Amino acid sequence: MMVEAKTLPVIGIREIDDQHAQLVACLDRLALWVGKGQGFAAALDAMQALNDYVETHFSYEERFLAEHGYPKLDAHIAEHQRIRDELAKLNIAVLDGGDISEELLTLVREWIVSHIGVEDREYADFVER
């Protein structure tokens, strides 16, 4: 299940919207490599790129929210941690042979897109005020 740019939620903060598009592209890249006989190295590379990107994006977003005095920052950070935990499960699956179930990959993708569409939209509304 690839996420097209036109279906990705937009929150209206250009830098973060651009990062979200790149984040989903990382997930889509992982979906292309994992479980399709493309090899362990390719799956591991795609997973590492996703992990690196998530850490960079979440760190940026958390600093941005702190700078703007977002009152739900702790809850937002907790959501980020839940996503990190799901990615850790994907990492284990890749390291155990590179075969991530489509269900797990879809769960993470939907969680990230839902997080963008709900929690990120909420802080964007706060920042716009």
Image (tube, rainbow, N blue to C red):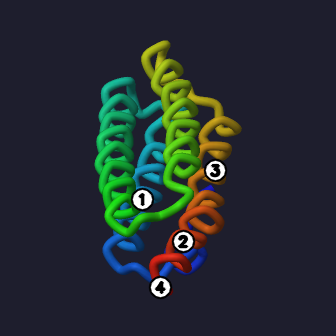
Q: Viewed as shown, does residue 12 lie left or right of 48? A: right
Callout 2: few (<14), some (14-19), or many (20+) C-alpha neighbours within 10 Å?
A: few
**Could you tell me the amino acid type at mark 4?**
Glu
In the rendered image, residue 123, in percent from the top left (x then y), is placed at 53, 69
Q: Who comes first in sequence, dot 2 or dot 3?
A: 2
**Looking at numbered disc 3 in the image, what kind of residue is underneath it?**
Trp
Q: CA distance from mark 2 to mark 4?
A: 26 Å
Is tag 3's residue or tag 1's residue first in the polypeptide sequence?
1
Determine the residue located farthest toward the bottom in the rendered image: 129
Picture disc at residue 4 = 2
For the residue marked with disc 1, what is the amino acid?
Answer: Ala
Asked if disc 2 and disc 4 are in contact, CB closer than 8 Å, the reply is no
Q: Please name the residue shown 65% across and 46% down the image.
A: 106
Percent from the top left, x then y, of residue 68?
A: 38, 69
Image quadrant where residue 69 sits: bottom left
Q: Would you call the spot at circle 3 few (<14 residues within 10 Å), some (14-19), or many (20 or more)?
A: some
Q: Is residue 65 above or below residue 38?
A: below
Q: Label 3, label 4: how many angstroms apart (C-alpha)?
A: 24 Å
Numbered tag placed on residue 95 in the rendering = none
Reading the image, the residue beneath label 1 is 25
Mark 3 and mark 4 lie on one chain; the one further toward the N terminus is 3
Tag 4 residue: 128
Residue where numbered disc 3 is placed: 111
Cα–Cα gap, marks 3 and 1: 15 Å
